[in-house]
Image (cartoon, grey):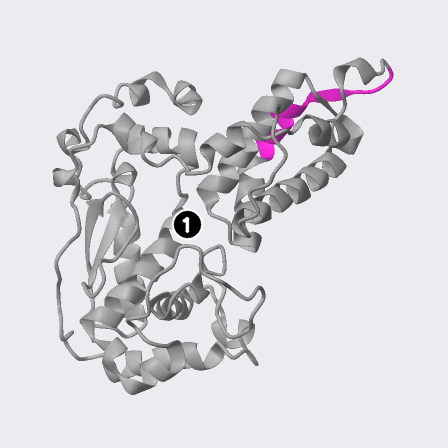
Amino acid sequence: MVAFEKAPPEAKQLLPVPIRELGLRLEGTPIAPLIEQLYAELEHAGLHHFRPLCYLTDEWGCPSGQPVIGIPWYLADPRAAQLENALNDVENEREVMMYLRHEAGHAFNYAYELYKRDEWRTLFGPFRRPYRDDFAFVPFSRDYVRHIAGWYAQKHPDEDFAESFAVWLDPASHWRVRYSGWGAMQKIEYVDRVAREVANCAPLRPTGETDITVEEMDQTVEEFYRSMLPDEAPIIADLALDTDLASIFIAPELRRDDATYYDARELLAEDRRVIVDKVNYWTGVRRTLVRALVIAIERRASELGLLAKKEHSRSHMIDLTVYVATLSMTFLTGAKRLRHRV
């Protein structure tokens, strides 16, 4: 994986090491103060007896029905975080808090068994509805809150509740103003009402069973990341991008002496995270897939020696962002007949 080469040497030393042998724990790590911030927000919101257990595992998650929060292992080690950043763009503090509030929503639902209530099912839907990664969504629907990228509240009733809880818990969400007149408001108001109801009540399920823990992860660090490659990687690697990129950027033979140019790849790399974040947020396409597309475009732009005119850099980036969004939506809608090199 080429991205491994961009990681610092001390991070690459982790690649052959089994994850369970890294000796990772939450205490004393950069993630620990953010967990304390989550607990402080829960207390400030009036939930005096709800403090979900957090543990290190393979990804963000809350095992179904279990009021515990799984946190990705790489956030507990700065070297591992550097590897994650080279491959997937590691979460910043704002994103970590978004995920913690979301997973706390799941844990709150399970701790007080809210999903068993008739009103919960009326507002959010059947808890036992099957999960689908390729869920259909209605862009810009006002019946759901907007929190995690990709219209995530529409994925499943349980996710709808967790997202509504996260917006309710976030001190900076201003939900009463932002969601005024939205269908989603009744869901947030339900969270608010139930939180007041159980404020001084111990959870029906104070703790639960964890999923795989970091101590049980036998994979090496390299094996873990190789297993995370998007399924579409072979298709992405073979995309015919040349004609499109030549219309967005400038071929080296068309360079003029009276203009200032950037290397197109450098311009792309500088704004990569912003492009990936925005396309992921507005299209709902998996972030790993969007990032793989952008990396493939960067690589091909470099191979072709493409340039970006300094005074047109904003135009270049607008064109590129629309192009990435279009490619991403092609994958999302299942239209696999993309142009390929021959």
Is residue 192 something one can see in this rendering? no
Q: Is residue 320 magenta?
A: no
Secondary structure, mark 1, is helix
Residue sitting at x 33%, y 16%:
9
Residue sitting at x 52%, y 33%:
236
* Extreme-right residue of the structure: 258
Q: Nearer the viewer, residue 251 or 174?
A: 251
Residue 257, x across and y down, in percent = 85, 13
Q: Is residue 270 magenta?
A: yes
Does residue 113 appear left or right of residue 278 in this picture? left
Does residue 93 appear left or right of residue 68 in this picture? right
Residue 97, x across and y down, in percent = 37, 54
Find disc 1 in the rendering and name its residue: 95
Residue sitting at x 31%, y 66%:
105
Does residue 99 appear left or right of residue 48 in this picture? right
Compared with 17, 121 (above or below) is below
Q: Residues within 10 Å of mark 1 (few under 14, many from 20)?
A: few
Residue type, numbered disc 1: Glu
Compared with 112, 334 (above or below) is above
Q: Quadrant of residue 5?
A: top left
Image quadrant holding the C terminus, namely: top right
Is residue 47 something one can see in this rendering? yes
Residue sitting at x 82%, y 17%:
254
Please state the extent of the stretch shown in magenta in the rendering. 258-271
